[in-house]
Amino acid sequence: MKAIILLLCLFCQFSIMAQREKAWGDPHVIEKFTAEAKKNPSYTQLHQQIAELSRAANGRQTNAAAVRALLIKNSALLRNIYSKAGLDAPQTMSAKKKQFVVNPNVYSKAILWNKYKLANSEFQKTFTPPYSNDRLMTNEAGVYIRTPDTSQSQFNTGTVKMKYETVPANSSSFRTGQHLQGYIQKIIVPENPEIVAAEITLNYSYLYTGWDSFGAILGMDIALNASSEFTGPDYAALPIYVSPNGENPNNTNHRWKLVSTLLPTDTINSDFEEFHIENSNESFTIRGYVTPGKMIDLSFVMGFQLYAKRGINGSYHYAEFIVKKITVNYFKAAGNN
């Protein structure tokens, strides 16, 4: 019996490793490249120059043009290292910045929309910053080198700012995900027995810009978590967002939902690539059943997908997420107004 359990454990371990390799790519690519690169003083100098440009970048000022020029100038050096390391050379880098069209998830609101009508104006509540608390969803708690610099975030204005720079060439520090950050708002439903549902509208803006290098995996999401005091077909229809702590997504207590994928999972197969996504005026509305007098915990976050990571030759990522306001309209059952 012990032998069977041991075999099952080994099988699970190999299965997990296979899944990680499929998502992250060959884990030895970085090791092979850096082992060869550190033998070359010219590459050490190049990496230091890229790291300095990455550190000097600030917000929208990414220093991408200077980094691109450095990599083009040193393309022969890089190809030589790839060859000696036994790696296939990356594709030719694009001269264009990647722009992404964001398509928010579409879900049905017909059931609640048709069944309930808006109550009187005294049953509307608007929340603005500062919110009840900040919210962090991550699988890298306490490991600073894997978490972004958020020192410029402003709690009082509902602003989250996340920045990743170029890191030393070791495989343990390249990952960026999973790391999503935002805010929690506690919403107390008025103690009016006629109230049966609520409409929650979140007004926000986002920015994700920067550049990365060969081997990087990009991915940026917005997710929502409402406590069990907010239920209904709208919430159930949203795609489940996989928890970073290993929680079973099929568990009925799993409440994280995907609101929007800002940047679909994208692997950089060239020496260098820029990216930019921005919307200064976005909103998301969802309806659900509520109970008078109960409190709803609402979390709204943006951040890096689980298997996101930085590339071999340097990176700069800057993300900004501003939750401008949260508006709640309460509903009575049709015919009760």
Image (cartoon, helix red, strand yellow):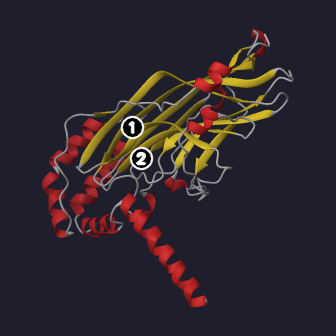
Asked which secondary structure carries label 1, the reply is loop
Compare residues 134 and 76 and report the one nearer the observer: 134
- Seen in the picture, residue 228 relative to 43 is either above or below; the reply is above
Asked if residue 95 shows in the view, the reply is yes
Amino acid found under the numbered disc labelled 1 = Ala
- Seen in the picture, residue 216 relative to 151 is either above or below; the reply is below
Mark 2 neighbour density, 10 Å: few (under 14) some (14–19) many (20 or more) = many
Q: Position of residue 32 (x, y in %)?
A: 28, 69
Q: Position of residue 203 (x, y in %)?
A: 57, 22
* Pointer 1 with pointer 2, Cβ within 8 A: yes
The residue that disc 2 covers is 165
| Residue 57 tag number | 1
What's the residue at 20%, 54% (across, down)? 90
- Seen in the picture, residue 182 relative to 329 is either above or below; the reply is below
Q: Viewed as shown, does residue 316 lie left or right of 334?
A: left
Name the image quarter holding residue 117: top right
Q: Viewed as shown, does residue 331 lie left or right of 94?
A: right
Name the image quarter holding residue 123: top right
Compare residues 73 and 190 and report the one nearer the observer: 190
Compare residues 255 and 289 and report the one nearer the observer: 289
Quarter of the rendering occupied by the N terminus: bottom right
| Residue 83 tag number | none
What's the residue at 76%, 10% (across, down)? 120
Point out the tag, 1 or 2, that comes first from the N-terminus: 1
Asked which secondary structure carries label 2, the reply is loop
Q: Viewed as shown, does residue 188 lie left or right of 247?
A: right
Q: Position of residue 97 (x, y in %)?
A: 27, 34
